[in-house]
Structure formats: structure tokens, C-alpha cells
Image: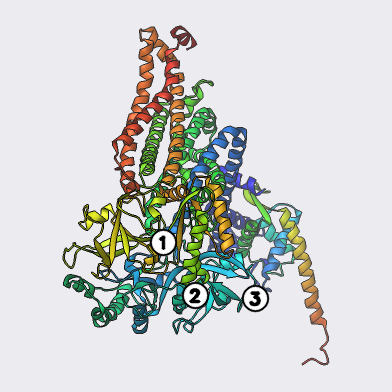
Amino acid sequence: MATRWRRFRGLFGLDPGRDVEDELSFHLDMRIRELIDRGESPERARELALRRFGNLERSRLECVAINERRRRRMRRADFITDRGQDIRYALRMFRRAPGFTTVAVLTLAFGIGANVAVFALFNRLLLEPLPVPEPSQLVNLVSPGPRSGPTSCGSMGGCEAVFSYPMFRDLERVQTVFTGLAAHRDFSVNLSHRGQTTTGRGLFVSGSYFPVLGLRPTLGRLLGSTDDRTTGESEVVVLSHAYWQSHLGGRRDVVDETIVVNGQPMTIVGVAPKGFEGTTLGLRPEVFMPITIRWRLAPDPRSPPENRRGYWVYLFARLKPGVALEQARAAIDMPYRVIINEVEVPLQEGMSDRMMAQFKGRGIRLNPGSRGQSSFAADARAPLTLFLAVTILVLLIACVNVAHLLLARATVRSKELATRLALGATRARLIAQLFSESSVLAFAAAVASLLIARWTIGLFRMMFPDAAPLPELQQDTSTLIVTGALALGTSVAVGLFPTLHAARRDPLSALKAQAGQPGGSRGAARFRVSLATAQVALSIILIVLAGLFTKSLANLSRVDPGLRTDGLVTFRIAPQRNGYTLPRSAALFGRLEEELAALPGVTAVTSSTTPLLSGDVRITGVFVEGYDAGPDADRETRYDEIGHGYFRTLGVPLIFGREFTSADSENAAKVAIINEQFAKKFGLAREAVGKGMSRDTPSFDLEIVGVVRDFKHSDLRDATSPLYFVPHRQGTRRPGLMIFYVRTSLNADETMAAIRRVMLRLDQHLPIEELRTMDEAMRGATTRERLMGVMTGAFATLATLVAAIGLYGLLAFAVAQRTSEIGLRMALGATRVGVRWMVLRQVGMIVMIGGTLGLAFAMVLGRAAQALLFGLHFHDPVVLASSIFGLILVGLAAGFVPASRAARIDPMRALKYE
Amino acid sequence: MGKLLPQPAPEILRGTFDLLILRALTWGPAHGYAIARWIEHATSDVLAVGEGTLYPALHRLEERGWIDASWGVSENNRQAKFYSLTKRGRAQLTVETENWRRYAAAVFAALEAQPSSGGG
């Protein structure tokens, strides 16, 4: 009933004001008539009627207000009803065209899903703040400038961000602008609980760490200021929520139980909150321990607690409310400079005047710390941004493709639309209808895309287990918002042009068009050409990027590491973390080498303290006999401490002298082996063997006994750096971690199984880490290149395929439409070759324009990607030339069939058909 | 005739007025004037209908969906807006009538009651 009334009113267009007036005046008239009938004079009757009615104006206004309110509500309801109708209509239509619908939804779902996945990574790795209260109040401390003394930095941040432990304590005491200053540093742990041993990461934290972050425990308590009073005491540990769940079954009675950390029994006092993984991306510590226990768990003879010249601890703080960053910086900088100048300057030895001046000038900088401290974020920014750019391209391609499909449908449907227009549907209503269709497609795709996003991330994680800390896709609000926004944007992008085009059409001309002949107007043809051009442009961008990364990967795989990787197996152990003393560790290493060497097929065994090609470097300054370049000379070199037979096992050729043997023991004369770059840097030509060298002071207590050919030690991508080796038994520090290399003539799997058996026999509680072939280890070192190569390659293939299909469709359609025209041309003397060229010329134009536009964009992206490329420039001529060539081939392939079809047109038949 | 002049009369209760309008429409569609007349007649003009409040009340009932309105021709051949009871309005009338009966009975009972001995 309500609907009928609405229609009625809508038809006659009565306005509510008039309506009410009519109604009220009818009432008054009736009353007046009644009064006149009773004998009143007309004037008197009118007066009486009005008086009886009361306040006429107020009554009228009240009625109008009610009606206005009702009308607004109804219009809203109408809108919703109409959209509901549109959507039902769209669904019915899509049900009738399942092929089209599947292709369109899948295309969009792929585009949206890839974007959601990459955005989720981007968000997790680069945008999301720490899960702590008020993360924006956190700041990280950095102190740039030169210094001397052992420096240890890692995944928690750059080397400018490490401080000495006494400096931390001083600053903690004097600072007034922070609610607290926290110190932390990661270390490797072997955890043993009820006989189960695992390896992982631990975090040494100051007592202020958890209070500064403002966290609450899941269970028990967190560490506090009473836990880090005295060095070497407080045998307490807080477990991460994840470790507690996975290894202690999430039991609530774990507090006060004992857990063995690196061989030392500790008491569990609590469990950290869920979702808290420390403040460094991807570090995921299993345990948090007081920083004062560090010297018992991970001894570091070069940085005892009182050493002001050993830099290793990372600092962050929470600003007091209302304190500005610059204010805080000034307030902490002043005491820092005082400590440097009053306390630390006198401790420095052997600094040149220039360096001392720079050292005195050191100050403190505060960086925003809401995302914690991590060097990974900086490394990941460039590749992730490129990822995002590439996936946005993919979504654009998907949109263009679906727009193309919809346009084709719109052309077919133009009669239907024209009929509806002629029957009185408004253009606005029709546009709304078409938009509803694209929205239905986009939102169906958005739902599917969440699955695709999940698979995409799963795939990344599977393909690259050693890549950065790839998160699980969280279906949280930000992901859903992004998905929704993408779907909305997509539906507009996809729907806009076909809709405008369809709505602009003149209903009469479309109705007149023959049923079998889709009425493609000039506008439609032009639009279709621009879509195809856009597809070509987008695909050349991806082709160029894929080419760049593929060549980069090829360059990298062609790099000669300078050692023989085939038949080489590697693994590492860290017995000290299981409580081994130094002599016991040394005995274990010796025993292990013997047993490994005795395995069938094993031809050589060696060890080192720095893993090959892992990016790890150890740097020191050295003095070399006969090399004198003044006090400020660059004396820096890399070094490694290795076992005997190292170069023979790895297959690195010796140029001069000899390699270390078992005779180079702790008590024997100290010896060193250098590489070619070292010899070059320190002026040792052929007579290097026999020269003396030393680190820290010019005592020249090491004798150079050999020179080896340069090989890739830390990173395949680096140019070879100066490097020297000493036997680890004569080394400067106790080897906590030992990496073994085993050369075998047998199958690598058999040898690895045998290695496991040996380790089990020697100590079943000692975990064996990263057991794999050297080839696998090297593949791990090229993860980034492979990831970029695979992704851009896959996307480029897809984009090109889509563009080729688009081109083909366009040309086939054009040829079909122009059949009679071509027939006429041929009848008038055009040759078949000429006709073929006519079609191919159109392909040529599209490829040229699209290709040029795309190349320009590709250069912009390529420049941004330069840092990720190895051994080539972003405008590498080979890549560009082959990309263009590939594009032309694709264009020709797409145009070939339509061109031949055009050339085969029989003029007589074509003309008769018309 | 004197009855048409404003006279001191009990103020009509708000909910009661709606009830009377709904009741007026049980005999079929009617325009506002007819409704006003019926209420005058049915209550012997004891209750002051307040014509000024009748129309806002009608529109409000229409907004609530209890009555429907459409333009039609009146008995003297003029365009008039006719109101009719909807299904929901009819149901509402039953409920309201029952409520009113209970309310009136309770008030009567209270007025007739003797003062209780322990009260005070």
C-alpha cells in the first residue's frame, strides 16, 4: 500500500506544502459550510471555524515537517531498494554468463589479492608500530662518529647505535627527560627444559626494559629494576609467549620451574604478553634475561662490564609526556658530551689528533622508535616498495582487462540499454545499474582475493623460508579496509568507461543497428584502442623489470665464488651455549673433526668461526711490517679464525707459502694467512711470506705464512676485500660458534645423515644447526634476487599474455567490422599483402605508443630499483633491446591471425554480404 | 449550536487521541473533517478534540504506518485526503484498546477503593 501511494504521489509530483494546505483548507471549508447551514453569516462562520481550529499556522508547519521527514526517509529507502534491485539483476546476468564472470572475478581477485598480500607485508614490516602502549613516545639513541675499540652490531640497528655498558649506566643515572632508559642486546641461546633442547634467540635486557615499554605479563612477572643490580646475579628468565605456548604447552604453573639457558640453570619468573616479539623485527627472542647475567651466559672477554671502549648495547627510551624530541635530545646530549670529554677521552689510546677531535665532538641523536630498533626495515624498504609498485601494476592490468571485457559486453548489450532508455529509464539510473554490475564483480573478487592473498604469502614463505620475517596474513581491520578500498577503486576503474560509453549512446542509433551487428561507434573503437595501448604499456614495464632482475640473478649466479661448492656440506654447533667450558669445547671440536674425517667418502674436513657467504664480517685494524702510512691511515681489514686444512677443503688455491696445519697449535708460533687484496692494500708484493703483522698494537707478533687467491668470503655481491686468517686455536676469543665444512665424494644426503649420527653419538643434547650443502647455503644468499626475478617474471608473463589477448581481440573485432570495407578496397585493387600490412600497421601503432609510454615508466621504476640490481645498470641496453624485441614479437603474433584473415577476405562475398 | 463554541472541557490525553482516530477509521476510509466530526459525536463533544492537533496526529500515524492516505473525492464532490486503517494500524488498535480498558479499570478501582487501615 505504502508503495502504491508513493508511486501515486511521485507521478503527480505534489509537493508536501501544497498537500497540507489543501487538506486544512478542505477542513475549514467543510466546517464553515456546516456553520452556514446552521444559520451563521459567512463572516461569522469563518471566524468561528478558525477559532475552533486553534493555531492554524502551527498545525500546518507541524504537518509539513512530518511529511518532509517521511519523504527523506522514503527516498533513502528507495535508493536502497533500487540498489538491491540492481544487484539482483547483476547477479542474474552473471549467472547467465558464467564464463565471463569467472574470468572477470578471477582476474580482479588475483590483482586485488596480490596487493593485499604485499600491503600486509609492507604494513607489517614498515608501518606497524610495536604492540605497546603509546609507541610514539619511544625514541632510539644513536651516537655517530669515530671511536676505537671492539664494536659489535647486528640486526638491531646500525653500528652508530651501540653504546658501552658503563655509558648506559651513566646515562640512566643522569637522565631526567625520559620515564626510563632501556638497554638490550640479542644473543644465541640453547634452551633445555625437561630434557628437550632447542636453539633460538635470547634478549639481554636492562631492568628498565619492560617498564619503559609499559608491558604487562601474561603470567608471573616481567623483569624489573631489582633484577639488574649486580653483575652475574639474578638467575631469572622471562619466556616469550610463543615459546611458552610451543614448548611448555602454555601451562600456567611454569613459574619457578627451572630452564637451562646456555648450560646454566635459570628460574622462570614470568611469560611476556601475547604478540610481543621484542623490539626488533624478525628477531623473535624466546627468552628475556637480565643484562647483568650476560657475562656468565655469553662471555665476551673483549667487553667486560666495566669496559668503556667495548660498544655493544642498544638503547631506547620513552619520552616523558609533553617533552618534545629536540628538547629531550638537548637534555641527554649535554651529560653525554660531559662523560665523553671528562671520563672517556683520557681512556683512548693511540688516536691521532684529528680522530681525537672528532671523538670529542660526538653527540647523541634521537630517532623515532615507535617501530622498535631494526636494521631490517631499512634493507627491506626498497624491495618492498618495488613489490608494491609491481603489484599495483598488476591490479591496473587486471582492471584494464576486465574493463575491456565489460566494454565488449556493453557493446553487445547496447540494444538492451537503448531499449531501457527509450522506455523511460533515466541515464542516472542506467549508470547506477552498470556500476552495480562492476561493484558486484569487484566485491566478489575482493572476497576471493583474501584467499589468494593468504596463498600468496604462504607461497612466499614456502619458497623463501630463509627470507626476512614474513608474517602470516592477518585478517585484521587494516587488511580488510585496504581490501575494501581496493575493491571500491577497482569497481570504479572497471565500471567507469564502459558505463560512460554506454550511457552516452544515442538510443535511436543503437535500436536501428542490426541485431547481429554490434553497434561499435567511433568512440567505442577509440576507447578500445586506448585500452589495448594501456595494456601494452603496462606489460612492457613488467617485461623490463623482469628482464632487469633476471639478468641480475644471472649475473649473480655467474659470479665465481673462488671456491668449489660441489660436494661440500656445512653445519654449525655452539657447545658453549650448552655449558661447555673452553677446554671441553676444544676437545669436542677436535674429536668431531677426527670422526668426520673418518666417515666414508669424506675427503677433507675443516672449520671456521665466521660462516661463509652469510653477510657476516669481522673487522679489525692491523699493523703490517714495512707498512707505514701515518697515524690516521686506513688500517682496516676483515679477518676470520679458521681450522687447519681450510683452503684445501674449500678448494681455494694457495699462491705462496703454506696453509695452517695441526702443528699450528695454541703454543706454537703465531701465524697468519692473507689474501691478494690484503697483500695489495698493505704493500706486500711477492715477498709477503715471512713478514710480521699484528692487530691493535704494532708488535708484529704474527708471521705471515701464506697468501691465498681472493675468494668470496662474506657476500657474493661484494668486491673482494682485504682479509686475513689466523688459526682459531691461536685466536683472540673463545669460539662460541663453530662452522664445519665437510668435503665428500659421496651423495650429500648420505653424508649429512652420517654427520647427524656422529653428533648424536658425541652429545645428543647438542643441537646441530643449519646442516645443508654449500650450494643450498649459497642459494640462501641470493634469495632477494630470486624473489624479485620470480615475481616480476611471473607477472610479466601474465601481463603480456593478457595484453596479447587484448590486442588480438581488438584486431579480430576490427577486421570483422571492416569486412565489407576491406572487400571494397580489394575489389578496387588493394593487394592481399597491402591488406595484411594495413592490419599490422594498426598493431604497430599501438605497440609503438604503448611501448614508448611503458618504457618511460619502466625507466622511472628501474632507477628506483637500481640498488637491488647486481652487475648491471637499470638502462641496460641488452635488457631494453630484448624487451622491445619481445614486445614486437608479441604484437606480431597477436596481429598475425587477424591480418591473415583480412587478407583472405573474398571481395565478392564481402560485398554481397553487405 | 452552542456546542460549536469553545467550552471548558477536559484536556484529551495524547495516547487516547490516537486511539480515537484509529477507532474512527474502523468504519472505513474517512477524511480529517469526518474523523473530527465522528469524535465530537462519539464523545458527545465532551472531549475537546483540538482540531489544530488532529492533523499533525494524522500525519504522525501515517508516518508510523498505522494509517494510509490517498486523495479522493468527498461526498460533496471535492478533492479530499482520505485516511484508512492499515493492517498494522488495526493490530495496534486492538492492543491500545485493551491497554486502555485495563488502565481505566485500574483507575476506577483505585477511585472506588476504601482507605486501607495500615496505610499512612
Residue marked by disc 2: A289
Q: Label 1, secondary structure: give it.
A: loop
Camera-side residue: A830 or A850? A850
Residue A805 sits above or below residue A709 on the image: above
Q: Is residue A67 visible?
A: no
When asked about the image quadrant of residue A721, the answer is bottom left
* Image-based side of A850 in relation to A208, left or right: left
Earlier residue among tags 2 and 1: 2
Q: Which of the two discs, 3 and 1, labels the residue nearer the N terminus?
A: 3
> Numbered disc 1: what chain?
A
Q: Secondary structure at mark 3?
A: loop
Camera-nearest residue between A156 and A7: A156
Nearer the camera: disc 3 or disc 2: 2
Q: For the residue marked with disc 2, what is the amino acid?
A: Met
Residue A351 in picture, x, y percent from top left? 21, 72
Q: Position of residue B85 (x, y in %)?
A: 71, 54
Amino acid at the residue labelled 3: Asp
Q: Nearer the viewer, mark 2 or mark 1?
A: 1
Residue A140 in sight from this viewpoint: yes
Q: CA distance from mark 3 to mark 1?
A: 40 Å
Residue marked by disc 1: A609
Mark linked to residue A253: 3
Residue B76 position within the rendered picture, expressed as x and y whole percent measured from the top left: 66, 48
Residue type at mark 1: give it: Thr
Separation of marks 3 and 2 at Cα, in angstroms? 20 Å
* Mark 2: few/some/many CA within 10 Å (<14, 14-19, 20+): many
